[in-house]
Amino acid sequence: MQQSLVLGIDIGGTNTAFGIVDHRGRILEKGSMPTVGFDTVAAYIAALRNEIMPLLDKAGRQWVTACGVGAPNANFYTGEIVQAANLPWKGTIPLAKLLQEAFHLPVKVTNDANAAALGEMMYGVAKGLKDFVVVTLGTGVGSGFVVNGALMYGHDGFAGELGHVNVVRNGRPCGCGREGCLEMYASATGIVYTAKEWLTQRSDDSVLRQCAGEVTAKQIQEAAEAGDSLALEIMSYTGRILGETLADVVAITSPSAIIFFGGLAKAGELLLGPARSHMEQNLLHVYRNKIAFLYSDLPDADAAVLGASALAW
Amino acid sequence: MQQSLVLGIDIGGTNTAFGIVDHRGRILEKGSMPTVGFDTVAAYIAALRNEIMPLLDKAGRQWVTACGVGAPNANFYTGEIVQAANLPWKGTIPLAKLLQEAFHLPVKVTNDANAAALGEMMYGVAKGLKDFVVVTLGTGVGSGFVVNGALMYGHDGFAGELGHVNVVRNGRPCGCGREGCLEMYASATGIVYTAKEWLTQRSDDSVLRQCAGEVTAKQIQEAAEAGDSLALEIMSYTGRILGETLADVVAITSPSAIIFFGGLAKAGELLLGPARSHMEQNLLHVYRNKIAFLYSDLPDADAAVLGASALAW
């Protein structure tokens, strides 16, 4: 008898990726389409249905038992997307309900960082871990906390907003309307902010001066890799703020590992070396030298779909 | 048939309280003895056995099925007390093992704040809550996090050290060897520190000047209750730091309630009013106006024993 399969959908700000996944994390069928360019959510869902239905038929529709979805600001308890800054739809979208109607499958949704944590636990570097954190370092900073083997959703499904922990009182203005959030320092957005600020205020010689006002996170990472001292200092400053914040995260949740995910995590030791050393310096003695820093090893293109699919099991 | 009973033991820095408790939180027998004044742990355990054995006989030894213990720095997973600053025994004490041998009962230990969280969930204001935090404001700051209906121990049993989250970089020196920990601001120790600092640096008229270098937390609380403006400002400053920290705690764990416990919590609205308002001001929008601030309503003398007993069920 064939084992059961699940449908995983990752809804990003630009693209939507999906796949049909077996219990061992093999993606049997997959595809993607733009998230943007639809007048209404209904039109988007209809287009998504048109893309996915042939895949379901190919894999054997009768074997697909559930659907898991990762999306920014998606709430596990309500099945809704609430005020997603990076999606084209405003207000509250009953995502689980719409997808359930489209596919006639039970649907579970959660935010992308939680989905990543589930994916790592089921198929990735967190296999067998019961207490860990996934930190996504991308345009923003996201996080998914696994506590005693299960995702920590909080009472309302909104736990794990590490990107909106305060790191500098009256600091940089954040998209959330407050000031000094971690996400304004330790994300792609944050390092660009730091670079622009320092390029204006300081006179260091740096290859980044050529980019002037248009510097990108990728350019900063590349300059750091090439040994540019301003870029390295930006990584070190960013790592310090991230590491100090992680020390506080450890004091609250005491995870065995912190797993990094997302574009900025690719800076690797240039960023996470300073982050680890500042975390260790700021840890209470009982936590020292026992927390693993891990990198996601799931293939980039598949990780988000695998994470979403893990929710469905 | 009589229902089963448990033995609850609360080991404090000065006194040890114990009781035999039924499933509804009624303390059938109770007593206490000093924690200090014994040459060895073995002598302390022997004295404790002498105190408790008659109570076990009185309640009916055959009905007592387990023992739960709350103690500073006690670890649920190992059953040990590790480097407790406020207990007379240094190093690592195999507490669960020693008590198991003394009473021939299964023994579970945890730190006092975790025990308080369990007590509130089983018998107190947290009945029916699945995601909440207990914050103990005493000599230090402790915390116990309940996530999805169970205590969050972390991978090593040391989760929940909220007192050692950093609130001021390069701030006041803490007993843990680091600087700027919450506990050096938002505890009895912390408000005394603030008062002494301000009395030296400032020239406000205040009844606290009469206490000079010997001001106590109790005097500051009483002065604030009597309307002394310096004392009120100390409460407000302390509440701000506590509230800002709680906003970050919420961003990570999203609890439905925060429950306050301990001597300094008795300052009530004078302290927790400012704490609530600063927490709300610093919350990400999704969390606003839905987190309850609660006070423990378990009788002071019994709360710690009830908490310890809750661990045994």
Image (cartoon, coloured by chain):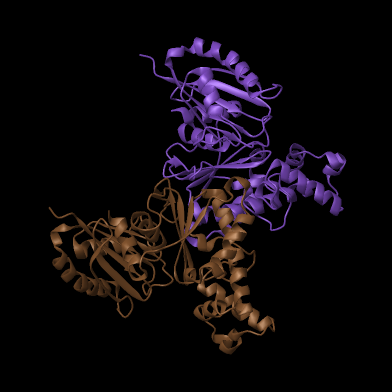
Chain colours: A brown, B purple
Q: Residue at x 32, y 67 (%)?
A: A302
The one nearer the camera, B100 or B149, is: B100
In this view, the residue farthest toward the front is A226
Q: Is residue B244 visible?
A: no
Choose top left, top right, bottom left or bottom right for residue B12. top right
Residue A186 drawn at (x, y percent): 55, 68
Q: Quadrant of residue A225?
A: bottom right
Q: Is residue A225 left or right of residue A45?
A: right
Quarter residue B296 falls in:
top right
Residue B288: give x, y in percent of width and height. 51, 57
Q: Residue visible at 63% across and 64% down?
A: A168
Q: Is residue A62 left or right of residue B8?
A: left
- Viewer-closest of A179 and A224: A224
Q: Nearer the viewer, residue A231 or A180?
A: A231
Residue B276, compared with residue B44, is above or below; it is below
Residue most toward the bottom? A210
